[in-house]
Image: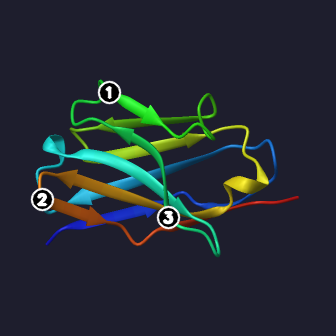
Amino acid sequence: QVQLVESGGGLVQPGGSLRLSCAASGFTFSTYFMRWYRQAPGKERELVAGISSDGALKNYADSVKGRFTASRDNAKNTVDLQMNSLKPEDTAVYYCNAHRLVRNYWGQGTQVTVSS
C-alpha cells in the first residue's frame, strides 16, 4: 500500500522557519522523482520544489528560490523541505508528490500558516 505522510507544518511568524518532512512507503522510493506542491485557499496547486531520485538535481519555484531547500534520504525513504525566511504568502497546504513514468502518488498535505 502506497503511503506518503507529510509532517512538520504549523503556525510560524513571518521570517521564521519550518522543516516539512514526507515519509514514503509501499513503493521503491529511491527510483522516484519527488516534488513538493502547495495550494493556498482559492488558488491552484503550484509546484514549489523538485528533487531527482538520487538527489543530485533540484529545482525550485522562483518565489521560493534562496529560501527553501529540498533534500532526501533514500535510506530512510524521506524527503524534506527546509523553509526559511517565511512570508505570509507562503501560507498554504503543502503536499508531497512521488512521480515515476505513469505512477503519481500524493500525500494528504500539511498546513503551513505564516502570520504574526
| Mark 3 residue type | Arg
> In the image, residue 111 lies at what x, y percent?
59, 67
Query: Badge 1 is on which residue?
Result: 57
Residue at x 72% of width, y 45% of height: 86
Mark nearer the N terminus (2 vs 3): 3
Q: Nearer the viewer, residue 70 or 60?
A: 60
Residue at x 29% of width, y 24% of height: 56
Closer to viewer: mark 1 or mark 3: 3
Q: CA distance from mark 2 to mark 3?
A: 20 Å
Relative side of 6 to 15, left or right: left
Residue at x 30% of width, y 47% of height: 34
Mark nearer the N terminus (1 vs 3): 3
Query: Badge 3 is on which residue?
Result: 45
- Disc ID at residue 102: 2
User: Given the current orientation, which residue lies at the most extreme bottom position?
Assistant: 42
> In the image, residue 43 lies at what x, y percent?
60, 69
- Res 10 quadrant in image: bottom right
Q: CA distance from mark 1 to mark 2?
A: 20 Å
Residue at x 67% of width, y 38% of height: 84
Q: Secondary structure at mark 3?
A: loop
Using the image, determine if residue 105 lies above or below residue 64: below
